[in-house]
Amino acid sequence: PAVIPGTTVYKGIAEVKPAQYILVREDGITKDMYWELKAEEFNESKEEAVEHVRDLLIDSIKRQLVGDVPLCTFLSGGLDSSAISAIAAEEYRKKNKILTTYSIDYEDNEKYFKSSLFQPTSDQHFAEIMAEYIGSNHK
């Protein structure tokens, strides 16, 4: 059910809002924010913004690829998983490794798939195209 932010479907129980924590002690309960989004003036050109976002995304993904165990990605064929998988595959290539990607499809999905405005086609085809493009070991 839909609820008003800060409330719940239960009487007398409030929501812990995003970036908020509660501290329960014998003398009571306190709420505080551990993070707050601050709006700042945007001074980058379109090209600078694109480069900045690209750098942040690559850095964020590269920091998740450290470790001594093999990693993989879930590749749905959508924009998010495709970007993550492409960057991870490129980093793996630099180390002479091949990224393993996975996608999930339902049995007889093509037979029963119903197109909609939200999802006009099945994602599996796009996942396969992306897996081939990035050279992943796709399963």
Image (tube, rainbow, N blue to C red):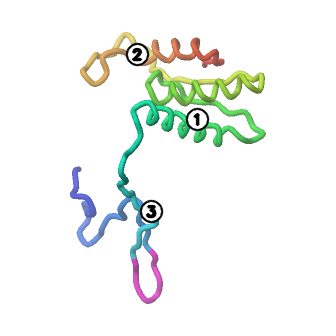
Q: Residue at x 32, y 64 (%)?
A: 15
* Circles 3 and 1: CB atoms closer than 8 Å: no
Look at the image and tell me in which quarter the C terminus lies: top right
Comparing 41 with 75, the one in front is 41
Q: How far apart are the two marked residues, 3 and 1, measured between alpha carbons?
A: 23 Å
Q: Which residue is mark 3?
A: 35
Q: Position of residue 137 (x, y in %)?
A: 66, 18
First reached walking from the N terminus: tag 2 or tag 3: 3
Q: Which residue is mark 1?
A: 58
Q: Quick one: label 2, few (<14), some, or many (20+) residues within 10 Å?
A: few
* Majority SS type along the magenta span: strand
Task: Identify the amino acid type marked 1.
Answer: Ile
Q: Quick one: label 3, few (<14), some, or many (20+) residues within 10 Å?
A: few
Q: Position of residue 22 (x, y in %)?
A: 43, 72
Judged by depth in the image, the label closer to the viewer, 1 or 2, is: 1
Q: Which residue is mark 2?
A: 109
Q: Quadrant of residue 24?
A: bottom left
Secondary structure type for disc 3: loop
Left or right: 94, with 27 as reference point: right
First reached walking from the N terminus: tag 3 or tag 1: 3
